[in-house]
Structure formats: C-alpha cells, structure tokens
C-alpha cells in the first residue's frame, strides 16, 4: 500500500513537470527515394540528396529563404563582397564566428579556398564545369578571399550560393575523412549529420553553434519512402510532417482536404520539352519540325496535368529565369496546317518517327498524350519504352529522333541555352552535355551573353538566341511542372515558401511547430 | 550426414561462380552509367570520366571481373558505386529485416496452411473444402502491393494499431515485433495460400493409400491415422513447395518492403538495379544464390527428419 502510494506520487510528480502541451521539436520528412546517395554536396546531384544538403550546408551567399530569384541573393558565410569593374576579380569578406559541425572549428578563408577548389576539381566534384572560368581562388588574409576569373561569368554569385559546388565544406573534416566524408558530411548549416540508417533515414540534429542562432527544432529525420501511396499513408497516420508530393492535380486536391494540412506548390518548375534531332531524317526538314509543333496541343496537356501544378511553357527557357522572353515564335495548335506542311515536305500520307522514351510514369503519361495528338495529324510516334537509366544512356548515344526531357536548372537563361543548345554540348561529342537537337545557331549569342557586363544587352542577346532557336524549331516546349510538397498546418518554415533551387523546402533555424 | 552436407556445399561452388559470372556480364551489358546516376545530368564529360575511372568501371570487363573475383575470394566485395559504403556492410545492415520477414512469413504460412489444407482434405467436396479452395485462390491471386495497402488502411490508418513505416531499430524486441506484424501477415497470406493448396492435394493422395485403409481397418483411432500416418507422409511435397517458393517469397518481399517501408534485400536489389550499382548487384546475387543453395540443402535434409526412409549419404 505504502509502495503504491509512493509510486503514484512519483508518477504524478513526473507528469507535473512535463509541460501541459509539449512543443514538438522533431520534424519527420518523407522523401520519394529508396535510399540516400553519396552525401557529399560536391558529388551528388539527385533530388533527395540536394534537398537534404540544404539543411546542412551554407554558401558564401544564399538565395533569400523561400525564394530562388537570383535578384534576392544575400550574404551567407560571406558578410560582404565587391567586384572589379570588369567583373573578373571578386573579393569576399568571411563572417567571423561561423562554426563547422562536430567541433571542426571556425570557418576561415582557408576552408573557403579549399572548398571552392574542391568543387572545381573534376576528380572530386560533379560540378567542375561550372567553375571552368575560374582562374584562381586565393586567401588574402584569414577572413578575406579573392576569386579571379578568366572571363566574366553570367552569375558568379549564383555559383557561390548553397547549391551544387557552392556548398562550403569544412577543410579539416574533408581532409581527415577523405572518401568517408560522403558518409558523414560536415558543413556549417543549422542541422548536422547524426545518423544514417540504411534504406530508412538520415537523422540530423540541431547545430547549437549555428551562426544565425540555435535552430528551434532539435531533430530532423529525413525518411526515404519510395512508394507514393505509403508516403501519403505515413503522413495520414501522423508519422511524417512534411512530404514530397506527386506533381499531380489529384494529389494536390486530395491532400488539401486533409485536416491541419497545407499543400505547398513552388518553384522551380521542371520544364518538359521535346528536343528534335535536326540531323536525323525526317526531322532534318524544317517543315516536318513545324508540323510537329502545329500537331501539339499544349493547352490540352496542361489540362491533363492539372492547372494547380502545371502551366504552359512559353519558350525554350523556363518562365521566370533571368533572360527568359516570351517574345518568341510559338507554333499554334493547328492539325490541318500540320498535315499541309507534311504534304509539302513529301509525306502526304503522314509519317512514322521512332523514338526512345523512359518508362518513368510522369513522363510516359505526357508522351502518350503527345502520341495521340500527333496521330490526329498523321504522325505516328513509334516508341521504344525503356527503363529510366537505360533511357539516359541511349539518348546520349544520339539514338532517338525526339527526346522528351524534363529539367530545372539554375535560373538564368545561360544554363538552359548552354546545356541544351550550344554546339559544345551536342551529345556524342567529347564535351557533350544535353544538346540532343544538334542546333548551333545561337552559339555566338550564348557566348557573348556570358561575358556581357551590361544586363540589358545580355538579356537582348539571350532573347535573340531564343528567337533563333525557336524559329529553327530545334525544340518544342510543352509545359512546366511545379514542385509540390505538403506539410502540417502547425509547422512553420519561418518564411513564405515560393521557391527552392534545391528542389525541397529549406528547413532552417527558423522552422518550428506552433 | 556431415559428409553429405560438405559434398553439397562443394558442389554449390560452381553454381555460385556461374551465377556470379552471368550477373557480372549481364549488368554490364544493360545500357546505363553509374557515374551519370551519381553526378546527374548536368555533369561534364570530364567529371563523368574521372568518376568512372575512380569507380573502376572504365576498365575492360575482363579486368573488372578478375579484380572482383580476387576481392571476393578474400572477402572484399567492394564498395557500393552509389553510396560508397562497403557492399557487405550494406547487406548485413538489411539482412536481419529480410530474415525476420521471411521466417515470419513461412511460419505464418505453415501455421495457417497446413491445418487448413488438412481440414479441407478431410472434408473433401463439402462446404468447408469449397470455401478453403476459393479463399486460398484469392490469397494467391491478390497482388502483394494491393493487400499491403489494404492492411495499412485498416490497421495503421483506421485502427492505428501498427505504424505505416515498418522499419525502426532491431534492438527493441517489442518494437521489432510491432514493425514486423503487418508485413509478415501480407507475405504470410501468400505463403499460406500455397501451403493450403499443396497440403490439401497431398493429403488427398495419401488418404487414398492402401496403408491408410489398413490402419483404419485395424481400428487405429482417426486422430492417429491423420496425424501419424497421413499428415507426416503428406508433408514431403509441402516442404518441397515451401523450399521452392522461397524464391517467389523473396520476389514478393520486394513489393512488401516497398509498401511497408522496410529495409531488406529485395529493396536493395531493386535500388541497385535502377542505379546501375554493379558491385552491389554482384554482392546481392552471391547472397541470393547462396540462400537458394542453402534452402535447397535444408529442404533435402528435412526430408530425412519427416520420413525416416529417406537417407542421406
């Protein structure tokens, strides 16, 4: 009896010290992936890894949280910077008191120099080509670095944000760990790596010494849940608070109806484009390419994808990118005109085009609609459907007459134009990236714009490039698919989420549960 | 007996080598580039080539094969091309989850399937028999991912008895059992359906044998006829089927692991295939081949326990 009484009192006391409603401090994120990749920000470019790097790393500068507009770039590890008149020499002043995770010490110019040189080294980085115009990066003193460029680049600050090669790694940790760095990454961001459970999750804990102040959340558990249905169910059951969504209207509507749930639709949009191989028959004939353009009903595809998540593409550069213009010749849907053009090109009975396409459901459903639309104009798409990794390998061997590609890039026109339309990027060449069209008509404008210091002139060059390439019908832009995530209504990012270049919402020191 | 086991294991070596060689060649014939998977579609050719070199996938296929065999013989299965973690460590990390799931599914299958099959056979062409046959057919034809989602909707969303994410740590036995329950039921249903049907037909065959009639004529009680004379003899085909269907179980476990968010060999192999993680695929194939060989051996040895007339030597 006595013992029971003491026990009850002890339990009562223990409960009494608990706050009436304990504030939740662990964020559970559900990501559409089977597992983590290499957790080195200079190596991995997959969506699941990039979104996670966001929480752990800083750049010299950063996009304003919740935005991906290059005009909002603000100080991060660098507190201020200046550049020479010709924009070839840049000096950055490093903020004092920026601490590396796990006690690896304060960031100095040596860390920045090491990190940028590492990002520019093809042996240690997948983003080395972004830094090809870098001549040298040197430490002026312990808190100042200088970047000297061979030629001005369109957006140097963009390269130095916490994105891809701009993520700053801590020198001592990276050198000490070598290859193991990718298993236990060390940065300076608000959350630091704590644990990896294979095929399950990565756990991050608050970096109490974060220079913007200790994060309000104690822990972030980033769970890998590849099945769309299971991820949604895990959210419904309360096991996750923030999840990667399917970019479909039905998903937005369904999740929006759940209690205490906010669906976030944000930039960047992945633009779906049909790249036409202008060197392959019958697409080497301009009239055939124009016919394809007139056979394509973009409005119908946008309706099919859903207005909440998709919008029609207006150019070969996505909407909102610096240098985007809609003053380009877009081909209107007109099946009769398509047929007439085909007849003129010598195909009065229509024609068959063989293409290779991925089995990835989102992309496959798009091309299936396109296939039906083309059929109305007498164009038969003979599709060889292959698994996604095979698709990527085959299209790079120049094997498909039409390549449907969906991508989001750093939001300036140069990235799209260089990677998809400059002659140096033509597939099958030693410097290949993703030019499947073989078009090289705007090389001069693309190159000139890169080093044009006057932004108005730069934009004019990009506009001419888009007009030339669209007139030649090198590609048919279809639609732009925005990113979709959902979160608990009482979870607050601490800012308005309008965009995130790393393709996942930024979880910063401000994130908290209300 | 020991000699028999050793002999079987020695014979397994050429099988393992053949499987390994086949997998080694096949995964490399399929188009796809692990470097591209890792570095993404914006990577320069220079960076891709540097990574291919570092991963060793730019060497002639024969050199890669020799390197791999050399490593495998000394227990070094290399590192996953994608995650950079040792293959063996990755396999070991998920193996307990697969073993848990497989053993639980087989147990559940046997516990449901054998009594149900026997019962059905004893009531041949009665309502119970028809019902069992229809239900077992349903169990067989239901895709694992559909039954998985239905189980989650009922027990994780409506009743909230079990979690949707059935992964968790293994050191807490209660948690481990809680996480295992739904996936094990999902996979166990399929196994139970197989076992029910095989037990039923096997029992029917045995029940028609002369020695059963003799036993009954001698006045042996029904219970003894069923348990001692019929079921024991009927079990040999059941054991064979359980052994054979282990492969199918592993196949179905991929879907179960994905739906229930459990780590496991199935999920590992699908991920490795999608990402062209050659070293991981090789390691996993060796594990699978070894598992199949081991299961066959255990199946053969079990015959001897069930039926003393079966001798190994």
Image (cartoon, helix red, strand yellow):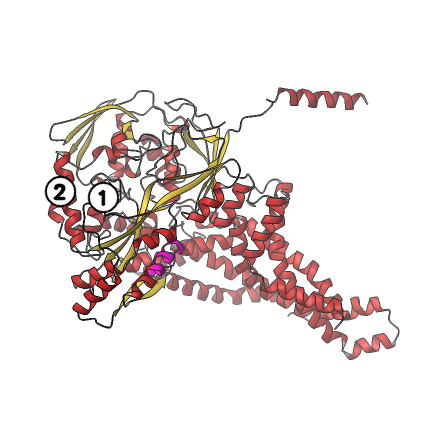
Which contiguous range is marked in magenta? Answer: A357-369
| Mark nearer the viewer, 2 or 1 | 2
Residue A490 to residue B309: above or below: above
Task: Please report whichever mark, 2 or 1, sits nearer to the chain's N-terminal start.
Answer: 1
Circle number at residue A415: 1
Residue at 31% from the left image edge and 56% from the top image edge = A392
Residue ID at (69%, 68%): B199
Count of number-bearing discs: 2
Provide residue A329's location: percent of width, then percent of height.
18, 51
Please give the name of the residue rendered at 22% of the width and 38% of the height, measured from the top-left corner. Answer: A322
Q: Is residue B195 left or right of residue A338?
A: right
User: Is residue A358 on the magenta stretch?
Assistant: yes
- How far apart in space, not on screen, are marks 2 and 1 (Cα)? 14 Å
Circles 2 and 1 on the same subunit: yes
Q: Residue at x 56, y 45 (%)?
A: B164
For residue A149, what is the image quadrant?
A: top left
């Amino acid at each position: 009896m006595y013992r029971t009484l003491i026990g009850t009192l002890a339990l009562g006391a223990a409960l009494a010290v608990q706050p009436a409603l304990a504030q939740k401090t662990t964020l559970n994120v559900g990501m559409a992936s089977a597992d983590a990749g290499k957790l080195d920000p200079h190596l991995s470019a997959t969506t699941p890894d990039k979104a996670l790097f966001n929480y752990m790393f800083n750049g010299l500068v950063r996009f304003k949280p919740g935005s991906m507009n290059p005009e909002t770039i603000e100080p991060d590890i660098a507190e201020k910077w200046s550049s020479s008149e010709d924009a070839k020499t840049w000096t950055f002043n490093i903020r004092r008191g920026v601490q590396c995770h796990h006690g690896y010490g304060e960031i100095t110019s040596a860390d920045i120099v090491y990190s940028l040189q590492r990002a520019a080294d093809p042996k240690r980085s997948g983003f080395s080509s972004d830094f090809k115009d870098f001549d040298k990066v040197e430490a002026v003193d312990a808190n100042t670095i200088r970047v000297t460029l061979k030629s001005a680049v369109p957006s140097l600050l963009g390269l130095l944000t916490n994105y891809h090669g701009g993520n700053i790694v801590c020198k001592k940790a990276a050198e000490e760990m070598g290859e193991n760095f990718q298993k236990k990454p060390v940065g300076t961001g608000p959350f630091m790596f704590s644990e990896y459970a294979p095929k399950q999750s990565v756990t991050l804990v608050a970096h109490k010494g974060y220079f913007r102040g200790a994060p309000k959340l104690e822990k972030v558990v980033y769970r890998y849940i590849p099945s769309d249905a299971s991820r949604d169910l895990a959210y419904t059951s309360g096991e996750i608070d923030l999840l990667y969504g399917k970019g479909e209207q039905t998903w937005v509507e369904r999740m929006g109806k759940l209690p205490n749930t906010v669906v976030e639709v944000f930039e960047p949009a992945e633009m779906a484009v049909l790249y036409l191989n202008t060197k392959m028959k019958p697409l080497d004939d301009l009239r055939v390419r124009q016919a394809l353009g007139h056979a394509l009903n973009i409005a119908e595809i946008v309706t099919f994808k859903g207005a909440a998540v998709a919008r029609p593409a207006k150019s070969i550069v996505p909407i909102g990118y610096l240098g985007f213009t809609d003053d380009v010749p877009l081909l209107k849907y007109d099946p009769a005109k398509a047929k007439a053009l085909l007849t003129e090109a010598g195909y009065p009975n229509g024609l068959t085009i063989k293409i290779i396409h991925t089995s990835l459901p989102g992309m496959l459903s798009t091309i299936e609609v396109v296939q039906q639309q083309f059929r109305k104009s007498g164009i038969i798409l003979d599709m060889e459907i292959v698994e996604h990794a095979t698709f990527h390998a085959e299209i790079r061997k120049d094997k498909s007459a039409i390549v449907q590609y969906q991508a989001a890039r750093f939001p300036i026109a140069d990235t799209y134009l260089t990677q998809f339309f400059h002659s140096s990027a033509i597939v099958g060449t030693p410097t290949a990236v993703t030019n499947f069209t073989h078009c090289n008509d705007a090389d001069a404008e693309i190159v000139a714009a890169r080093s044009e210091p006057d932004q108005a002139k730069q934009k004019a060059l990009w506009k001419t490039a888009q007009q030339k390439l669209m007139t030649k019908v090198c590609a048919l832009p279809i639609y732009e698919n925005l990113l979709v995530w959902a979160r608990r209504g009482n979870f607050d990012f601490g800012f308005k989420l309008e965009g995130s270049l790393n393709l996942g919402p930024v979880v910063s020191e401000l994130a908290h549960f209300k | 007996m020991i000699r028999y086991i050793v002999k079987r294991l020695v014979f397994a070596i050429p099988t393992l080598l053949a499987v390994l060689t086949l997998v080694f060649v096949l995964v490399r014939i399929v188009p796809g580039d692990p470097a591209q998977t890792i570095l993404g579609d914006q990577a320069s050719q220079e960076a891709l080539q540097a990574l291919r070199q570092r991963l060793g996938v730019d060497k002639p296929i024969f050199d890669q094969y020799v390197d791999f065999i050399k490593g495998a013989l000394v227990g070094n299965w290399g590192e996953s091309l994608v995650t950079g973690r040792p293959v063996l460590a990755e396999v070991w990390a998920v193996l307990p989850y697969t073993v848990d799931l497989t053993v639980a599914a087989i147990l559940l299958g046997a516990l449901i399937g054998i009594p149900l099959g026997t019962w059905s056979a004893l009531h041949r062409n009665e309502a119970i028999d028809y019902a069992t046959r229809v239900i077992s057919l349903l169990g067989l034809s239901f895709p694992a991912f559909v039954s998985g989602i239905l189980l989650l909707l009922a027990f994780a969303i409506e009743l909230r008895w079990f979690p949707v994410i059935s992964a968790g740590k293994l050191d807490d036995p209660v948690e481990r059992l809680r996480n295992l329950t739904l996936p094990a039921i999902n996979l166990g249903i399929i196994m139970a359906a197989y076992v029910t049907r095989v037990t039923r037909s096997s029992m029917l065959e045995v029940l028609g044998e002369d020695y059963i009639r003799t036993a009954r004529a001698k006045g042996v009680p029904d219970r003894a006829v069923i348990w001692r004379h019929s079921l024991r003899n009927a079990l040999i085909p059941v054991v064979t089927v359980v052994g054979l269907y282990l492969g199918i179980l592993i196949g179905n476990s991929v879907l179960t692991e994905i739906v229930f968010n459990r780590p496991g060999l199935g999920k590992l192999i699908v991920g490795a295939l999608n990402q062209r993680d050659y070293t991981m695929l090789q390691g996993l194939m060796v594990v699978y081949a070894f598992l199949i060989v081991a299961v066959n051996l255990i199946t053969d040895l079990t015959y001897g326990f069930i039926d003393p007339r079966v001798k190994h030597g």
